[in-house]
Image (spheres, helix red, strand yellow):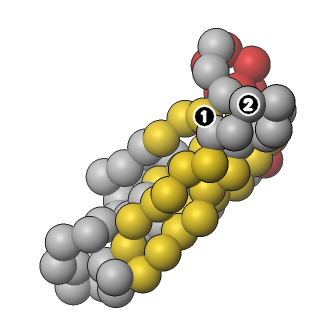
Amino acid sequence: GRKEGRGSWTSVLEREEIAGTAEADVVVCGHTHTPFARSAGGVLFVNPGTVGRSRWSKPTYAVLDLAPGEPPRADIRSV
């Protein structure tokens, strides 16, 4: 079926296009409850998943590392 919005299935090319207009180092999104952390075009895209109950996946959350002078990183963790 068709996936709505943007998520782990979004192509690198599409993420690079979004990164070109983001004016940010990190873009955090949600709604799909599918956790991911992927970079494109110098921007880190993160969906922390869901920390609540989900019929489809285990609860997850993201920890962002925004150390000065380093590229942003995200660690997806299970509850």
Closer-to-camera residue (75/28)? 75
- Residue labelled with disc 2: 68
Which residue is painted at 30% across and 67% down in the image?
50
Vertical placement of residue 58 versus 74, above or below = below
Examine the image and state in which quarter residue 8 appears. Answer: bottom right
Vertical placement of residue 74 versus 6, above or below = below
Measuring from the top left, give residue 7's x and y in whole percent.
53, 54
Measuring from the top left, give residue 42's x and y in whole percent.
81, 32
- Residue labelled with disc 1: 26
Which residue is painted at 48% across and 75% down in the image?
77
In this rendering, which labeled residue sits more in front, label 2 or label 1?
2
Most extreme residue toward the front, as rendered?
Answer: 68
The answer to whether one can see residue 44 in this image is no
- Look at label 1 and name its amino acid: Val
Which residue is painted at 81% across and 38% down in the image?
70
Horizontal side of 14 relative to 26 (left or right) equals right
Most extreme residue toward the left, as rendered?
Answer: 53
Look at the image and tell me in which quarter the C terminus lies: bottom left
Look at the image and tell me in which quarter the N terminus lies: bottom left
Where disc 1 sits, the SS reads: strand
- Look at label 2 and name its amino acid: Pro
